[in-house]
Image: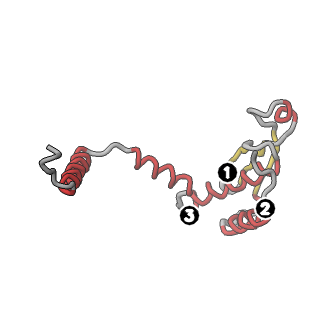
Amino acid sequence: MTQQSVSTSKHRDLAARLARLSVLESDLVERFVKGSGPGGQKINKTSSCVYLRHRPSGIEIKCGQERSQALNRFIARRKLCERLERLILGEKTRRQREIEKIRRQKRRRSRRQKAKMLHDKRMNAQKKTLRKAPKTDEDR
């Protein structure tokens, strides 16, 4: 089950982030629309999906992740901050850095890297065989 309300410390952090990016509440156009997806009758009847538009930059965000309107408002503003940071400051978001890290990990090794890795493994195996106790006449 997801958390329905957002803590005051998270609200303060988001407000500070918006202030740092000089985003005013008057610059935002906020509409509430009916969401889609799982949730049945509840999601079909209530307008819990948030449509947020930042007038100066023209960035539009639609967030209907949660069933709660308040939580969707918070998430939409957080996504807006991430996009603006990427646009203004050129920063990569934490999520983007994680995706790039996974992509690097999954990337196929070059032939030279693979050969070096296999060579190192063979050398390590040879070291381990030298560590074994010498065989006695009874073992042979």
Kindly give the residue lying farthest to the right in the view shown.
Answer: 45
Cα–Cα gap, marks 3 and 1: 17 Å
Kindly give the residue lying farthest to the top in the view shown.
Answer: 40
Kindly give the residue lying farthest to the front in the view shown.
Answer: 138
Of the numbered discs 3 and 2, the one sitting upstream in the chain is: 2
Q: Residue 23 placed where, x, y %?
A: 71, 63
Quarter of the image that includes the C terminus:
top left
Closer-to-camera residue (14/56): 14
Relative side of 138 to 21, left or right: left
Closer to viewer: mark 1 or mark 2 = 2
What's the residue type where badge 1 is placed? Gly
Would you name the residue on which mark 3 appears? Answer: 89
Would you name the residue on which mark 1 appears? Answer: 58
What's the residue type where badge 3 is placed? Leu
Residue displayed at 79% across by 34% down: 39
SS category of the residue bearing label 1: loop
SS category of the residue bearing label 3: helix
Would you name the residue on which mark 2 appears? Answer: 7
Q: Residue 1 placed where, x, y %?
A: 75, 45
Question: Which quadrant would residue 28 be assigned to in this image?
Answer: bottom right
Closer-to-camera residue (47/65): 65
Q: Answer few, some or many: residues within 10 Å of disc 1's Cα (few below 14, many 20 plus, some between 14 and 19).
A: few
What's the residue type where badge 2 is placed? Ser
Q: Residue 135 placed where, x, y %?
A: 15, 50
